[in-house]
Image (cartoon, rainbow, N blue to C red):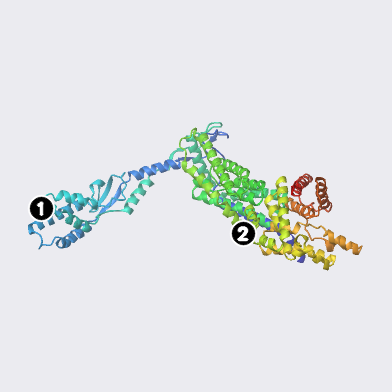
């Protein structure tokens, strides 16, 4: 039992990868649309590259989406709406008129005959309005001139313009009150009528919609049929508009028939095999070419999470409306992976993701071509993402590639630039704007997965940050040394193509452990008093060595990223505290060098190796007296040769050529530092 548990514990990382592999396959296949795949790929305007195709069964030719929408719109435009004529509303308006008339036109103030004439005029106006009908016209579609008026359970077709609106009262009152003695009462009567009038012709939404749906249901979604055995298209024949519709109809029938209960598990099994092959390629790539990432389960999980996220978002968009597929900002994937890892890994993962999505999207060839080209442009153009202008320029180039590629395919299919779907071009612009969201997304990923981007490194390189400010106050000599080392290391890293920003940040923080006992380090001693004079060589060596351990603890306390802490851990490797080791040898011949050796580890990347070289060269250069070109050259060669002899760079993946380049940069920088100026006369 214990052996099994030990074996399980030792292989837990590998077991987790198997689990991640299986879960990823399951979710990707689960996201896939529930339908089979037509075995032929075809495009409008291209030649049919397969054998002569005959109809395997009888099927109808489906109308395309635009054709159906056009016919539906035609029916909607011809549709006659239904309105109900309500007689009860008219009765209420007449009663309200009779009640309000005496209060507006008092019998004591007016001539009785005049009042009677005026009242009769008002009733005539109401009769004229309500006999035709009063309707609300504000939301009426002007294209529909005819309506059905439901009156006494009978539908009568009338001109909508013959119906009155309340605003027509002013015109009618003016036409009725023509006699001079009545004109003075036009406005009061008009106000009275407006206060009692209510629309008695009401739009019947339910009946209108029912009538419209009945007409729409009569529309046929097919146009003709193809009989079994009939030739659809011959080998080499160009897929024109007519054959394209037939092929699409056959594809739809084939896929719907294929996805039956009998075939369900077989199709799922086929999808599973293909997705498993793609993800296996990803694992093999990581294991062979990125072993440090493969060994880190957090980073592997991060990569798979992003692949699953892109597959999920794309499939959801396709299920909602496939025409929106290009709004998904797929180029965010290589942007993020290049930011946290490298361009080659980003492009490889991106291409595999696009291949998976080829099973999901319509016109898979066009989609895969456009996305791969856009992904290559993304990897080639995006650099120094922490500079905002670079991101905007790259996103503009990506959007341009999408648009140019789309227009090229449109020309192939249609033969000209007419009938361009401007909506699709708008989707590409929207895609570009969403891609700009990569900046906040990088920040979220940093917090979720503990990764470090150049944006974070740029923030950490600020010498006004809390930790570096504290270092400059407590150990100003060490702070100045760190600045000099960062300049040396950054120049060397840029020259050999390493991560210069990462090296610079690592150099700035590599000696923060000296803040605990700053006076025990010579660069911080401002008097002739040396605290080491009161300590034994072994104790002095321990104080010096402890600045590495103390630096790691301080870095963790201040939440520095692990990639930066790696520089603190490895900047002395497993070298000796040589000065005190030699001093102890003067006292006793048999000295245990483990008491004077840094705990390590040795540098394990080009960046950490560069820092070790820069740190040693800069620190030792302070002992140079009257340096010359020759002295500086020999000095740098000697320091780095000693580190190589001590096998400090065997795990650093750095070549002899790169080391020679680094030495050349160090020599050049030191010459500039120690360059003697002309002595000016007094």
Around disc 1, counting alpha carbons within 10 Å, would you say few (fewer than 14), some (14 to 19), or many (20 or more)?
few
Q: Position of residue 677 (x, y in %)?
A: 75, 47
Residue occupied by mark 2: 448
Assign the N terminus to one quadrant of the image: bottom right
Q: Quadrant for residue 477, please give it.
A: bottom right
Residue occupied by mark 1: 181
Q: Is residue 6 visible?
A: no
- Which of labels 1 and 2 is toward the front? 1
Q: Is residue 602 above or below residue 343?
A: below
Q: Position of residue 80 (x, y in %)?
A: 30, 46
Q: Are marks 1 and 2 in contact (CB under 8 Å)?
A: no
Q: Is residue 171 visible?
A: yes
Q: Please tell me whether mark 1 sits on a helix, a strand or a loop.
A: helix
- Residue projecting furthest to the bottom: 534
- Residue projecting furthest to the right: 589
Q: Position of residue 319 (x, y in %)?
A: 51, 50
Q: Residue at x 60, y 44 (%)?
A: 378
Q: Work out whether residue 48 or residue 290 is closer to the camera in this orientation and state it.
A: 290
Q: Quadrant for residue 598, please give it.
A: bottom right
Q: Is residue 267 above or below residue 514?
A: above
Q: Residue at x 20, y 59 (%)?
A: 93
């Amino acid at each position: 039992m214990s052996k099994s548990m030990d074996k399980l514990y030792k292989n837990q990382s590998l077991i987790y990868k198997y689990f991640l592999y299986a879960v990823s396959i399951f979710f990707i296949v689960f996201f896939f649309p529930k339908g089979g795949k037509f075995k032929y790929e075809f495009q409008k305007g291209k030649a049919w590259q397969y054998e002569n195709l005959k109809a395997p069964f009888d099927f109808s030719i489906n109308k395309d989406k635009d054709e159906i929408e056009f016919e539906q719109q035609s029916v909607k435009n011809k549709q006659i709406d239904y309105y109900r004529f309500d007689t009860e509303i008219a009765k209420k308006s007449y009663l309200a008129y009779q009640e309000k008339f005496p209060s507006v036109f008092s019998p004591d103030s007016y001539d009785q005959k005049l009042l009677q004439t005026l009242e009769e005029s008002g009733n005539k106006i109401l009769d004229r309005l309500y006999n035709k009908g009063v309707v609300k016209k504000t939301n009426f579609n002007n294209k529909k001139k005819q309506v059905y008026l439901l009156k006494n359970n009978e539908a009568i077709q009338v001109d909508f313009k013959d119906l009155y609106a309340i605003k027509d009262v002013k015109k009618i009152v003016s036409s009725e009150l023509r006699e001079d003695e009545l004109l003075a009462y036009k406005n009061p009567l008009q106000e009275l009528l407006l206060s009692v009038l209510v629309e008695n012709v009401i739009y019947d939404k339910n009946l209108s919609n029912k009538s419209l749906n009945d007409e729409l249901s009569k529309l046929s979604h097919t146009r003709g049929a193809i009989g079994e055995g009939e030739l659809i298209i011959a080998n080499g024949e160009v897929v024109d508009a007519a054959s394209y519709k037939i092929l699409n109809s056959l594809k739809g029938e084939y896929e719907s028939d294929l996805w039956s209960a009998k075939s369900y598990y077989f199709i799922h099994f086929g999808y599973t095999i293909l997705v498993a092959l793609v993800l296996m390629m990803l694992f093999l790539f990581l294991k062979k070419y990125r072993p440090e990432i493969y060994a880190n389960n957090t980073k592997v999980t991060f990569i798979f999470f992003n692949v699953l996220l892109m597959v999920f978002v794309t499939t959801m968009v396709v299920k909602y409306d496939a025409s929106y597929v290009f709004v998904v900002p797929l180029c965010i994937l290589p942007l993020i992976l290049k930011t946290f890892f490298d361009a080659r890994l980003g492009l490889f993962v991106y291409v595999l993701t696009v291949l998976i999505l080829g099973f999901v999207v319509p016109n898979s060839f066009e989609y895969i071509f456009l996305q791969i080209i856009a992904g290559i442009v993304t990897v080639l153009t995006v650099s120094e993402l922490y500079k905002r202008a670079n991101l905007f320029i790259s996103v503009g180039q990506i959007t341009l590639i999408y648009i140019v590629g789309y227009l090229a395919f449109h020309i192939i299919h249609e033969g000209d630039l007419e009938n361009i779907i401007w909506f699709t071009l708008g989707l590409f612009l929207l895609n570009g704007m969403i891609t700009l969201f990569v900046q906040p997304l990088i920040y979220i990923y940093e917090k979720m997965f503990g990764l470090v981007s150049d944006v974070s490194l740029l923030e950490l390189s600020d010498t006004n940050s809390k930790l570096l400010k504290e270092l400059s106050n407590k150990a100003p000599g060490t702070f100045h040394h760190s600045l000099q080392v960062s300049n040396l290391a950054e120049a060397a890293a840029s020259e050999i193509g390493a991560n210069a920003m990462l090296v610079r940040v690592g150099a700035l923080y590599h000696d923060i452990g000296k803040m605990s006992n700053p006076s025990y380090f010579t660069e911080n001693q401002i008097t002739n008093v040396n605290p080491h004079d009161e300590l034994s060589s072994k104790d002095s060596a321990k104080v010096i060595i402890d600045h590495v351990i103390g630096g790691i603890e301080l870095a963790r306390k201040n939440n520095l990223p692990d990639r930066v802490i790696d520089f603190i851990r490895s900047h002395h490797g497993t070298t000796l505290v040589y000065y005190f080791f030699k001093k102890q040898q003067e006292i006793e011949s048999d000295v245990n060098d483990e008491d004077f050796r840094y705990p390590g580890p040795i540098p394990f990347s080009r960046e950490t190796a560069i820092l070790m070289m820069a740190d040693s060269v800069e620190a030792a250069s302070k002992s140079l007296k009257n340096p010359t070109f020759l002295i500086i050259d020999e000095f740098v060669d000697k320091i780095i040769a000693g580190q190589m002899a001590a096998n400090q760079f065997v795990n650093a993946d750095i070549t002899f050529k790169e080391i020679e380049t680094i030495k050349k940069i160090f020599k050049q920088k030191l010459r500039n530092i120690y360059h003697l100026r002309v002595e000016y006369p007094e």
